[in-house]
Amino acid sequence: MRSVRDNLTESGLVDSDIAGCVGYVDIHCHCLPELDDGPATIAEAISLCKALSDDGIVKVIATPHQLGRFSGCNSAEYVRQTIAQFSEELKKNNVSLEILPGGDVRVDERICQLLEQDEILTLADGGKYILLELPHEIFIDIEPLIIELETAGIKSIISHPERHPVLAREHNILYKWSEYSACLQITAGSLLGDFGQSAKEAAWEFLESGLAAFCATDAHDLLGRRPKMTAAFESIRAKMGKEIANLVCIENPLRVLNGVELEAVYPVVAGE
Ligand SMILES: [Fe+2]
């Protein structure tokens, strides 16, 4: 298996500004202990973070669920405090991984108000991007929310639409939302078939159409939801070329961390 450093060295990114971080950047991960449906204990969370680091990830935005069934839990300040404490545990255990605050925010008409009240988090606590999770049981057209957020200067990132029963098929809805600056995050495991054939096909279609700006782990544990960024990177690189793999696994995630505009994703012919 090639290492992330091999991939970055070959791509030229090791010497660039972007590779000031030599590794992948994960914008969606449930790696904090005792907060949501991620690790239940500090020991499990340390093991998951070690797996993230072993998978070539150097920076991760912790995105515990906020709102929905976690309404009233995981406030912005509590997530920040947990990260500060847990990062000390990682250091003590020699796990090299930078964790930043964020949320996997269930869509809710109060989101802009709750952001103003500092109850929920934007990604990397930067005020520029928010990760939005839609319910899978029912389809909700969130165009008004996306517009409201855009008006407030916040870009919406739709988490794993390839796993949503309606969005995986109805791409026109996503094109419509993208006109209001929404972009898509696909899950590494989806590209590899971990969530079934239709999620796999939709994830690749989103990449090939340029709708997907990010690949992230959405890791929860070391069993069925373990991080698979390196395998996904390799797969994207083989099918679409190294530029796209770098863009969705490193460059655009770093732009979110830095609160700057994204690069557009363009289809690249395999083998280029
Ligand atoms: Fe998630």
Image (cartoon, rainbow, N blue to C red):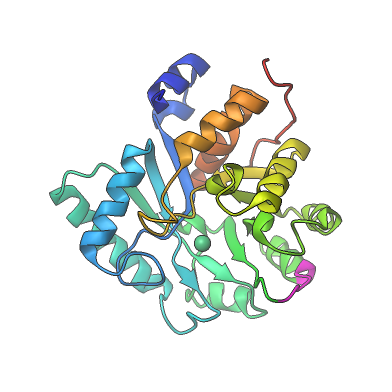
Task: Check the image and name the residue furthest to the front.
Answer: 197
Residue 19 locus on image (x, y percent): 44, 27
Query: In the picture provided, is 168 more to the left or to the right than 20?
Result: right
Task: Check the image and name the residue furthest to the left.
Answer: 92
Q: Is residue 238 magenta?
A: no
Number of labels in the image equals: 0
Q: Taking the image as drawn, is residue 196 in sight?
A: yes
Q: Nearer the viewer, residue 32 or 102?
A: 32
**Magenta stretch prevailing secondary structure:** loop
Q: Is residue 143 magenta?
A: yes
Q: Is residue 239 above or below residue 56?
A: above
Q: Taking the image as drawn, is residue 156 in sight?
A: no
Residue 271 locus on image (x, y percent): 67, 16
Give the residue at x 26% y 53%.
Answer: 47
Query: In the picture provided, is 253 more to the left or to the right than 146?
Result: left
Give the residue at x 71% y 45%.
Answer: 201
Residue 153 locus on image (x, y percent): 66, 58
Query: Which quarter of the figure has residue 144?
Result: bottom right
Give the residue at x 39% y 40%.
Answer: 57
Q: What range is drawn magenta here?
A: 138-144
Residue 5 locus on image (x, y percent): 39, 23
Q: Quadrant of the C terminus?
A: top right
Q: Is residue 166 above or below residue 236?
A: below
